[in-house]
Amino acid sequence: GGPAPAVPPRWTSIAPSGGGISLTLTGAPNAQLTVQVSANLTAAWQDLGPVNLNGSGSGTFTDPGLVATNQVRFYRTKE
C-alpha cells in the first residue's frame, strides 16, 4: 500500500520559439512547478515563472528573452 512514488520532473526538449526558447518537461500528472534560472551553476537561482503539468504529466515553459539576448542560462524546477 501507500502512496505512489513521486515522479521527478525531467526536461525532455528545448527548441527556439520566436525570440525565446521553449522548454518541455515531464513529471507527475497535474504537478505545479516553478522554473528557476541561473547564469551559472554557482550563482543564486531565481524564480522565472510557473509551469503546470497536464494530466499526462507533460508541460511547456517559454523563456521569451533568451535567444534575443544570447545569454547562457541554466534551468531547474522546484515544487
Image (spheres, grey):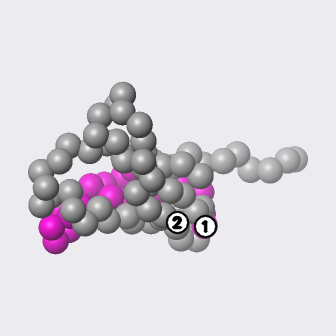
* Residue 2, position as x, y percentages in the image: 85, 47
The answer to whether the residue labelled 2 contacts the one labelled 1, judged by CB atoms less than 8 Å apart, is yes
Q: Secondary structure at mark 1?
A: loop
Q: Nearer the viewer, residue 73 or 16?
A: 73
Q: Residue at x 39, y 65 (%)?
A: 60
Disc 2 residue type? Answer: Leu
Q: Nearer the viewer, residue 47 or 54?
A: 47
Which residue is the site of mark 2?
53
* Residue 77, position as x, y percentages in the image: 48, 49
Does residue 23 appear anywhere in the picture?
Answer: yes
Q: Main secondary structure of the magenta part?
A: strand
Mark 1 surroundings within 10 Å by alpha-carbon count, few (fewer than 14), some (14 through 19), many (20 or more) = some
In this rendering, position of residue 9 left or right of residue 69: right
Which residue is the site of mark 1?
30
Disc 1 residue type? Answer: Asn
Magenta span: 11-30
* Residue 52, position as x, y percentages in the image: 52, 67
Mark 2 surroundings within 10 Å by alpha-carbon count, few (fewer than 14), some (14 through 19), many (20 or more) = many
Q: Secondary structure at mark 2?
A: loop
Question: Which circle's residue, 2 or 1, is located before the other in the chain?
Answer: 1
Q: Residue at x 42, y 48 (%)?
A: 46
The stretch drawn in magenta includes residue 12: yes
Query: In the image, which disc is placed on residue 8?
Result: none
In this rendering, position of residue 51 left or right of residue 64: right
Does residue 22 appear anywhere in the picture?
Answer: no
Q: Is residue 75 above or below residue 56?
A: above
| Residue at the extreme right | 1
